[in-house]
Amino acid sequence: MPYQKSFFLYLVLALSVVFLAGCASEKFKTTTDLSEFQQHYEKMAREKAKSNALDQQIFTNAAAAPDAGDYLLGPGDLITVTVFETSDLNTEVRVSSRGTVSLPMLGNVDVYDLTAAEAEKKIEDLLRKDYLRDPHVTVFIKEHVSKQITLVGEVKNPGTYDYVARRSLLDVLAIADGLTEDAGSYAYITRTNKRTNQRQTYRVDLEELISKGNMKVNMPILGGDVIFVPEAGHCFVDGAVRKPGIYPIKSNMTITEAIALAGGLRSYADDDQIKLIRLKEDGSRDVVSISYSELQSGKITNLLLQDRDVIYAESSGLGLFSSGSGFSIGFMGTGVNYHAPTQ
């Protein structure tokens, strides 16, 4: 009898293990091979890198002329006019509501919608006509009041602000009291050419600017610019992790970093069944199975998270059993206790 009882106990244990393993079947079935998945997104990354290089070239061209030469004068702007031939004609004057400035000897001169260079030429022509043989004039815009800048998106105080002096991107972000915690890694600056009415958008890497202090990307801001800071992308971490939830995606964020944000894997997680679920362009989803140990060792690389990615840690049936402690399985007094894992 003791032998039969012992045999029956082992039988119950074996059946329990099989039962629990069955309970821990995969939540998400793999739909694509890891190598194919990587090749597809590496190709997309190369295409994006080419696009980024073009963005950087356009940005460099824009930043190469930080003197706001395209700024068009308007009411309220304060300018300094210097005539090199005689200091008596030098003056500092504000543009009137009608777009004119009052200059010594010349009286009211219309400078509305002129650039500084155009205003210089106009004043030189007027002086040459009646007063000076070969005048040389400079116009410096001291305060840019007639144009405004607009900050929208993930800044603490979005809104429209007067552009009272030449500013950089960091300057205007400071005006809006900086970025929110949900700010993404890029800022987009939209600029309109008032003469051609064409719009150009520049992208600035905020990680490079703020975290790394690369002042080469601290783009000059002109009156009329619109600065948009989008919200960071998010990923969802679920399954056998300690703190399932939605987490913001920081620059170049990996699966292991997302799992770390979720408190790490639970003891019953299946290390070889970490699922990455990604929404494709056609609305379907790719599901790829990844080994957590290979991620940690660096054997699997180039798997950076994208907006709306889902990381799901599958459970191991044997892991559930070995770490368990909750509901009871028993028969005729020879029961085996099993409790749901908490670690």
Image (cartoon, rainbow, N blue to C red):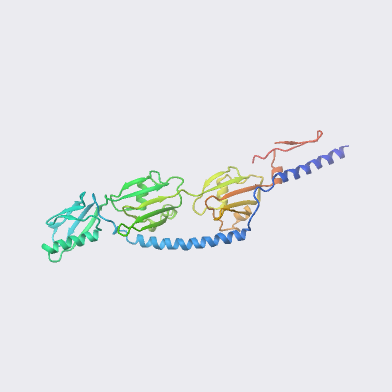
For the point 25% across and 56% down, which residue is it? 113
Provide residue 240's location: percent of width, then percent of height: 63, 45
The quarter holding residue 65 reads: bottom left
The residue lying toward the viewer, choosing from 85 and 231, is 231
Q: How many marks?
A: 0
For the point 81% across and 39% down, which residue is it? 9
The quarter holding residue 12 reads: top right
Q: Seen in the image, is 122 located left or right of residue 54? A: left
Provide residue 208's location: percent of width, then percent of height: 43, 55
As drawn, the residue found furthest toward the bottom would be: 134
Specify whether residue 131 is in view: no
Q: Seen in the image, is 135 located left or right of residue 321? A: left
Look at the image and tell me in which quarter the C terminus lies.
top right
Q: Seen in the image, is 338 located left or right of residue 148? A: right
Provide residue 10's location: percent of width, then percent of height: 81, 42
Check the image and report above or below for 298 versus 19: below
